[in-house]
Amino acid sequence: MAGEHYFSADPAVAHERHEVVFHALDQEFRLASASGVFSWSGLDRGTAVLLGEAPLPGPQTEGALLDLGCGYGPISVVLASAAPRTTVYAIDVNQRALDLVRENAGGRRIVAAMPDEVPATVSFAQIWSNPPIRIGKAELHALLLRWLPRLAPDGVAWLVVAKNLGGDSLQRWLAEQGFTAERHASDKGFRVLKVGKPLS
């Protein structure tokens, strides 16, 4: 499927540029996008629901935040704008996406990186993700088990998953792994999950 090229490290599809315009934090964002990255022609519904329903970090928030599967960077840019004292790690396997994040950072404290480039010593006050459900259940579970344990002890992860793509079953699976997982909101067929580290 052509739409799956965004899972590639170096997309083979033609490099067609586009500008994505959306609103968050009572302001307008205009971000560069391009073919070969996730939802390149406009802000996807899941990300819009996540940014609209989950509580964004405040200006006093400090530490590191993670945008897991960042695409061209809409979540990263909003997080860095909302919490300028933080450093937002925007990670993706798609090099074209990471190049766009660097372009869209606009001086904000955003580090665009491949997963293995994130220092192992970094823990995250918050993780935000519209996770790549279509990579398959086993790969998705491995992805979450790699990054969720890197939450700070009082950290929280915000995930958005379409109900028809397994939002409720993912919530149950997270609980089975020992994480705290609750449904924070439901909107437009999506679940917004609030996830915390296992209770000691």
Image (cartoon, rainbow, N blue to C red):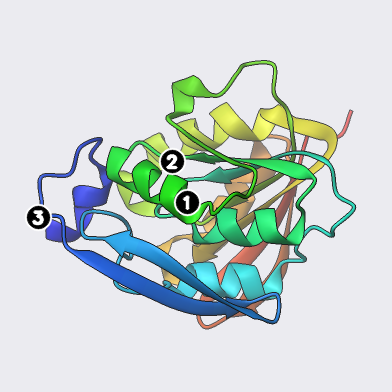
Amino acid type indicated by mark 3: Ala
Closer to viewer: mark 2 or mark 3:
3
State the CA–CA distance, disc 1 to disc 2.
8 Å
Residue at numbered disc 3: 14
Residue 1 is at least partly visible in this image: no
Q: Which residue is drawn at 69% across and 28% down?
A: 150
Q: Is mark 1 on a helix, strand or loop?
A: loop
Q: What percent of the width, then of the height, locates residue 127? A: 66, 45
Q: In this view, does 87 lie above or below 23?
A: above
Q: Which residue is drawn at 38% across and 35% down?
A: 139
- The answer to whether marks 1 and 2 mark residues whose Cβ atoms lie closer than 8 Å is yes
Q: Quadrant of residue 185?
A: bottom right
1 or 2: tag closer to the N-terminus: 1
Amino acid type indicated by mark 2: Leu
Residue at numbered disc 1: 131
Q: In which quarter of the image is residue 154?
A: top right
Q: Residue at x 49, y 70 (%)?
A: 46
